[in-house]
Image (spheres, rainbow, N blue to C red):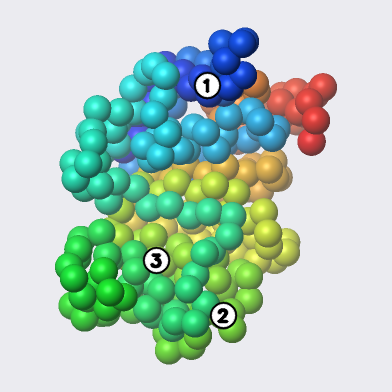
């Protein structure tokens, strides 16, 4: 089975401070995620976790190495070709970033706009042919009855579930989740982790998720990856990762 996400020997060096040759954020990182696999990245602040996700999504251009998503080499693409390739990747962030004054259904429909670039959508209109699909995505996250409700009335956990529905509305092959439970209470965090694991396993999506909670990674991930100072130091099944191995990711580093 071909990997949905393939990262090979990735290097990312930020240009500052120029007097020291720049800051090395990623140093020869190689990662792959298969269809239906839920992989979690652990590491201290500044270890390169978010940089890795942004390189995969071609939000950052790596200094060296390659990134393939659903068979497309992302580092070589520009313009419309890149925009089309990015449709294979759904993005979920720490904050849901919903349009609070619009309905839940309208927010989910926004995930379909990459396929409908028209004057009407540029002016804020929604593609009516996607409404049924958007409702089915709300079904997947258990919020269909919330479709007409204003997004600004949702709890934090509900808002994050809507952001996942919005990502699913894009019809992606893989999901990137950057600390999706960091702002949530423990119960809501568990709910989001269950949801991400379910859509990965049942829909065949490859999910790569950044977390700061090793206990959640152990309970829900198929694989756990550890980053320290820009280097991948382990890539194991949860049962093969000792507590001391995880603890070493954070030793001697500021929280």
Residue 25 picture location, percent across and down? 57, 23
Separation of disc 1 and disc 3 at Cα?
A: 34 Å
SS class of the residue under badge 1? loop
Indicate the quadrant where residue 34 lies.
Answer: top left
SS class of the residue under badge 2? helix
Residue 101 picture location, percent across and down? 49, 82
Residue drawn at point x = 58 percent, y = 60 percent: 95
Separation of disc 2 and disc 1 at Cα?
A: 39 Å
Q: Nearer the viewer, mark 3 or mark 2?
A: 2
Residue 63 relative to residue 43: left or right: left
Residue drawn at point x = 59 percent, y = 55 percent: 94
Q: Which mark, residue 152? A: 2
Residue drawn at point x = 66 percent, y = 31 percent: 46
| Position above or below: 186 against 61 | below
Residue drawn at point x = 25 percent, y = 59 percent: 114
**Closer to us: 16 or 12:** 16
Are circles 2 and 1 on residues that touch, CB within 8 Å? Answer: no
Residue 68 relative to residue 140: left or right: left
Would you say residue 16 is visible in this rendering?
Answer: yes
In the rendered image, which residue does mark 1 sit on? 15
Q: Residue furthest front?
A: 19
Residue 87 relative to residue 33: left or right: left
SS class of the residue under badge 3? helix
Are circles 3 and 2 on residues that touch, CB within 8 Å? Answer: no
In the rendered image, which residue does mark 3 sit on? 166
Indicate the quadrant where residue 10 lies.
Answer: top left
Among numbered discs 2 and 1, the one appearing first in the sequence = 1
Among numbered discs 3 and 2, the one appearing first in the sequence = 2
Would you say residue 137 is visible in this rendering?
Answer: no
């Amino acid at each position: 089975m071909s990997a949905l996400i393939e990262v090979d020997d990735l290097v990312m060096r930020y240009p500052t401070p120029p007097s020291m040759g720049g800051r090395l954020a990623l140093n020869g990182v190689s990662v792959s995620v298969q269809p239906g696999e839920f992989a979690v990245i652990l590491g201290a602040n500044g270890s390169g976790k978010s940089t890795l996700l942004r390189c995969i999504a071609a939000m950052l251009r790596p200094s060296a190495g390659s990134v393939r998503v659903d068979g497309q080499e992302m580092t070589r693409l520009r313009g419309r070709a890149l925009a089309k390739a990015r449709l294979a990747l759904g993005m979920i962030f720490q904050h849901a970033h919903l349009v609070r004054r619009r309905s839940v259904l309208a927010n989910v429909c926004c995930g379909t706009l990459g396929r409908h670039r028209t004057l009407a959508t540029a002016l804020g209109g929604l593609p009516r042919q996607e409404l049924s699909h958007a409702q089915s995505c709300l079904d997947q996250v258990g919020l269909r009855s919330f479709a007409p409700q204003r997004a600004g009335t949702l709890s934090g956990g509900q808002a994050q579930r809507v952001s996942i529905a919005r990502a699913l509305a894009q019809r992606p092959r893989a999901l990137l989740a950057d600390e999706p439970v960091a702002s949530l209470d423990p119960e809501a965090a568990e709910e989001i982790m269950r949801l991400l694991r379910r859509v990965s396993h049942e829909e065949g999506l490859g999910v790569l998720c950044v977390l700061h909670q090793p206990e959640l990674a152990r309970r829900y991930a198929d694989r756990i990856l550890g980053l320290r100072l820009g280097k991948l130091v382990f890539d194991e099944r949860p049962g093969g990762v000792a507590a001391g191995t995880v603890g070493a990711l954070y030793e001697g580093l500021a929280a």
